[in-house]
Image (cartoon, coloured by chain):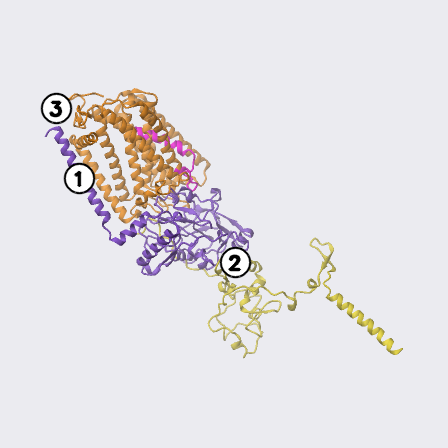
Chain colours: A yellow, B purple, C orange
Amino acid sequence: MKTRSFTCPTLVLVAILLFQFMSATQSQAVRVKEFDRSGKLIVVEKTAAELQPTYNIKNKLAENIFPVPRPPFSEGIFPCSQCHSYMKPNPTRRTLTEYHTEIVLHHAEGQRWCTDCHNLVNRDKLRLVSGELINFTESYRLCGQCHGDKFRDWKVGVHGKRTGYWNGDKQYLLCVHCHNPHDPKFKALKPLPPPERPGTARH
Amino acid sequence: MSEIEKNEYVQHRSRRKFLKEMAAGIGLIALPGKEASASMWEDFFQKHFRELSKDELKNVLARLEKKYSKQFSKQVTVKATPPIEGVRYGYALDLSRCIGCRRCVYACVKENNQSRDPQIHWIRVLQMNKEKGVDLSQAEHYYNPEKVPEKGHFYMPVQCQQCENPPCTKVCPVQATWKENDGIVVVDYNWCIGCRYCMAACPYGARHFNWGKPGLPAAEMNPDTHYLGNRPRPIGVVEKCTFCIQRTREQPGRYPACEEICPVGARKFGNLLDPESEIRYLIENKRVFILKEELNTQPKFFYFYAT
Amino acid sequence: MKNIWNFFAGTLVLVSKGSKAYYCWVLFLLILMGIGASAYIHQLNEGLIVSNMRDQVSWGFYISNFTFMVGVAAAAVLLVIPAYVYEWGPIKEFAVLGELLAVSAIVMCLLFVTVDIGHPERFWHLIPKIGLLNFPQSLLAWDVVVLNTYLVLNLTISIYILYNIYYKREPKHNFYTPLVLLSIPSAISIHTVTAFLYNGLGARPFWNSSILVPRFLASAFCSGPAFMLLIFLLVRKYTKFRIKDEAIQKVAEIMAYAMFINLLLLGAELFKEYYTDTIHLDSFQYLFQGLHGHSALVPYIWTAMVFNVTAFFLFLVPATRKNTMTLIIGCVLVFIGVYIEKGMGLVIPGFIPDTLHEIYEYAPSNTELLLAMGIWATGLFVYTMLLRVAIPILNRDFHVADDGVGSFIGDQLFLVQQKTEPLPNCNSSEQEYTA
């Protein structure tokens, strides 16, 4: 019969698709072969969530948001788009001559230039290596890409400065509050006066 | 004159002299004006801080507030905030970060109403030699270069270590200094007799004496004070760092002034009993040491290297 | 009641009358006391900043003198032990004078501490139930207790004995012997406690050696008797008071042994520090050689060493011990030597270098020197006054009159040549009892 012969393969197809679909959505662990640290090939169970590649931005877990004070922008410089929305993005690596000339890059300048961190099209965002765009208030993620140990320490308060209450709300100062991102090395400071030597003050 | 008459004459004269001196002495005591003398007597007879009842403490604080407000021509508050339950303060100093700029020293002076002349600093920053390491005998106290940090040197600020086993509280003959429940070692400035035995006992040079009348300009005075902490001290008593007791015992507690001002974030402060605190993290994960460990003072001021 | 008034009247007559030398001496002391008092008033007005003590060297000249005088006070026991414990005649008679020295020395100690503290009016904080005395944790609290106990004990014993002799009564053995026996551990205690208060500080490695206590006791047993011997020689020369040669020789011999132990213990300290050669050597180096260019105490300590060793030999060799002139020289040398070694030579190097290894060279300021001089004058004045009353009593020259109420003074002058006849203004009908 014509109809019967049509429905049979359709039904089978539907069944296969359903089965595939169900098995795909099941949170059953999948057994995959992997190399362990000593080089042996072992079988490991992974959940579907773990099998997803994390370099895909869509699959990335949300980073913690830390309480940071306002980034230390120079007066009137932000939002960047107030100028850059009218300008044509120029990805050519060059020395700037018209504007932002006071910024001299002394920070991996052999490896990168402006648009490696500042997003080329949307200047109000910073750009991570993965392509993800972040706000200036999350600039620590950008620094943390290379300076992972400092980032780890900063997250627990060992690196960097915190103000506020030791048992209450704190403000975690951003990396850029202390380190100029274009020239991060600390400049030496003039020290405040030493204590008086005992017995030298006139009384 | 016969012997007996001579003796009687001597007796009369000596008695007269004695009475005259007594009268002069009493007159001297009665001299100051009525109000001043009333507070003077209260000052003199004030009991030890820990023996004051709630009402007596209120009176003492009110009297001191009046005195300081008058002296500095501004509204001064003196509080006696008790320790917070379940807190033991700890401090950590990152030797890989300190640049020896001394901003902590002067922030402390401002916050804690230290005498400007004669000069008292509660924090002393030592310039150490990188080649010699942590060797106090190589420390330079009076460094004053154009810029810090200088090459080949690292910097180590020293202040009261708030020891768990303090040698200073052991030796005070009148118990004018003791360790509070939150670990801060405090001084009752109205009880201290100024014998300076605690200064001889402190291994860290953390205690300072008011040799002369403290010179504190009214304009620079911090009016938010604590009885055991930063209230203006009288002459002739010992003082020292109190981990900014007037700030840290607030609810919520503020950071000490030195921690806040440090431009490189070398100072860390928190509750040692809180497993989530910064101070606990770094003690558990970084290379930490204390000064003069062999003296078993168990200081709560830790030095560490973050890198 | 009238008896006591008469007694005091008598004492006032005694102290206010004397030879020219006596007047000169007392006037001199009063002037020094006046200068000291004005220095103290200056210090009270300005605060301790008029001294040269600072945070780095927080104890200085006053506490140095205090430490030395505690040793002198403790040494009265040196005379008491043989006198009362062994009932050794020659010393028994004048052991009271040693106790009076202890009283004067303790008065000086209390004065030195009073002028050193920042708030002397808060002394009541030290009184046990009224204030809050940190006993038994604080060694200074112990010192307060034992010093006052020692003072009270010595006052009680000497006043009791003198008063009874004044009343021509034999002092009751059962009363004073237990007190005297108690004063022996009390004397050892004052100096041991003072040594402990330095000893117990881990922050000051110069003091933190267990040898400090025996060193203190040994040097105390040299310095106190040195002063006593000088007094005895004076008293023997200028009053009717008889002091046997044996007594003086015995005390000098004991001093020789004490000085030997003192030098031995110092030698042990020096060996330990110089041989081990740790950072703790710094304080000894400062004292004996100078440290990083600072050497203010070096000439003083070497002077003290020379004096001590010389005196040791002077006391050891019987010939020089018997010769009065060398004996006097020896006593003076010991006194000055121990004053330097146990005074500034002990307190200052404990603070140099300080806990953070800073060197602040301390030398006493003028105010400190004048005030210390005033306190020394006060101590000597107190002792002079006490002797001025005690010696006539012991000579049986000052006693209750025949009517049992008034007081009788035989010889009015303090300094009387032993061999001269009674002077014109004394009544020839008076009886003279010799000691």
Q: Residue at x 34, y 36 (%)?
A: C67
Q: Nearer the viewer, mark 1 or mark 2?
A: 1
Q: Residue at x 50, y 75 (%)?
A: A98
| Picture coordinates of residue C416, whole percent (x, y) | 17, 25
SS at mark 3? loop
Please identify the quarter of the rendering in which residue C403 is found.
Answer: top left
Front residue (pair A85, B138):
A85
| Picture coordinates of residue A17, whole percent (x, y) | 78, 70
Q: Is residue C222 magenta?
A: yes
* Magenta highlight: main SS: helix
Q: Assign the N terminus of chain A to one quadrant of the image.
A: bottom right
SS at mark 2? loop
| Picture coordinates of residue C83, whole percent (x, y) | 32, 23
Magenta region: which residues? C197-226
| Picture coordinates of residue A81, whole percent (x, y) | 53, 76
Q: Amino acid at mark 2?
A: His
Q: CA distance from mark 1 to mark 2?
A: 75 Å
Furthest-right residue in view?
Answer: A1
Residue C427: assigned label: 3
Q: Nearer the viewer, mark 1 or mark 3?
A: 1
Residue B17: assigned label: 1
Whether discs 2 and 3 lie on one chain: the answer is no
Q: Amino acid at mark 1?
A: Lys
Q: Disc 2 marks which residue?
A: A159
